[in-house]
Every structure is written in C-alpha cells, then in structure tokens.
Amino acid sequence: MTLQYKRLNAEVDEIPYGLLELADPSKSMVEDYIRRGQCYLAFLEKERVGQFVLLHTHPKTIEIVNISVEESFQGRGFGKELVLKAIETAKQLGARSIEIGTGNSSIQQLRLYQKCGFRIASIDHDFFVRHYEEEIIEDGIACRDMIRLRLDIF
Ligand code: COA
C-alpha cells in the first residue's frame, strides 16, 4: 500500500481544485498558494489518493497550507501517511519549523496533527469570520478561530 508522490507543476498540470477545496473552500486562496507553494500529489497505483501543499512562510519555516484525501480513500490511514510525508519533505527542504493551521471545529484534524507531533502554538481568534463569507459549521460547532500548530525540528 505504498503511495507514490509526484510534484504538481502548476504551469502545465491540471490543478485538482475539487481535492484542494475539501480542505479550503476559498478558491482564490487556493489559487494564490498553489502557485507560490509546492503541491505534492499522492497516488496508489494509478489512482489519486490525496495531496499536500507546502509554502515557505519565513526563513526555515514551512507551512502545510492544504492537505486532503479523496473522500473515497478517507479513514484508511492515508491522511496520517500524508502528514508524515509532508513533514519529511519540509525537513528535506530545510525547514526547522513546520506549521499547520486548522479550525477550532476540526476535531479529527486536531487529533491527527497532534498525534503526528504538532503542538498548539497560537489561536487566531475570528480568523474564519474575517476571511470567509459563509458561516462554517462542523459537528455542530461554529468554526471561528484558527488553531495554529507547530512542529520544531531539533
Ligand atoms: N471520525 C473520527 N476519526 C477518524 C475518522 C472519522 N470519520 N476518519 C479517520 N479518523 C481517525 C483515524 O482513526 C486516525 O486516528 P488514529 O491514528 O488514532 O487511528 C486519524 O483520524 C487519521 O486517519 P486517516 O485515515 O489517516 O485520515 P484520512 O485519510 O481520513 O485523512 C484528512 C484525514 C483530514 C486529511 C481527511 O479526512 C480530509 O481530507 N478531510 C477533508 C480535508 C481537510 O479537512 N483537510 C485538513 C484541513 S485543516
């Protein structure tokens, strides 16, 4: 069940908006960071399973700005595999600090990231209220605050 990875070339390859939008409903934000960052697509044999996008935000700091698994492949361990691969790739790119953010209502993601070594670093209160027009509700919880997590490499 080994995943194969291929880096997306945003100039020539088709951008998998549907997959990216599973993690971020804002197409304009996706369009912005897909061109500035590096998107890695994961395949199981010929089928696309998921992706992650890395973005250099500060010297030696890389943020995982988007990560998602195709709905038909979710809940089978691929998300965890992608997070671990994103960490390895960021390290190879020279990161000493890796960041990831998620909504206060994204309980499964908060659990997954902490199990992969991330620790909560800060909370951007009302981030989603300021940046998204539609109200987001997950598991009956209003998504308002951005929880920023960080993994420092020693
Ligand atoms: N409910 C509760 N827990 C679940 C679950 C579910 N429906 N599906 C998976 N999990 C648990 C798993 O048991 C596992 O925990 P464990 O290590 O304790 O066993 C953990 O979550 C990771 O499971 P995994 O199968 O690797 O996750 P995944 O392949 O479903 O990928 C996401 C996780 C978040 C990437 C995927 O669900 C996704 O693409 N979601 C939509 C996009 C998104 O929210 N991206 C992140 C934005 S911050």
Image (spheres, rainbow, N blue to C red):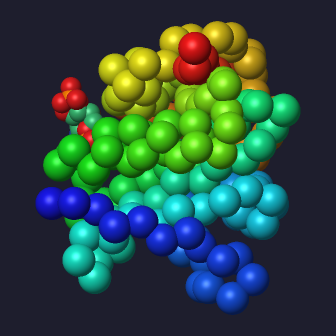
- Which residue is at a point 52% across and 54% down the rendered structure image? 52
- Which residue is at a point 54% across and 74% down the rendered structure image? 16
Judged left or right of residue 86, residue 96 is: right
For this rendering, which residue is in front, 11 or 97? 97
- Which residue is at a point 48% across and 40% down the rendered structure image? 88
Q: Quadrant of ligand 1?
A: top left
Judged left or right of residue 64, residue 132 is: right
Asked if 47 appears above or below 110 in the picture, the reply is: below
For this rendering, which residue is in front, 136 or 75? 75
Asked if 142 appears above or below 7 in the picture, the reply is: above
Q: On the rendered image, what quadrant is the C terminus found in?
A: top right
- Which residue is at a point 64% across and 11% down the rendered structure image? 121
Q: Is residue 140 visible?
A: no
Q: On the rendered image, what quadrant is the N terminus found in?
A: bottom left
What percent of the width, then of the height, locates residue 22?
48, 56
Q: How many marks?
A: 0
Asked if 40 appears above or below 83 in the picture, the reply is: below
Furthest residue toward bottom: 12
Q: Is residue 91 visible?
A: yes
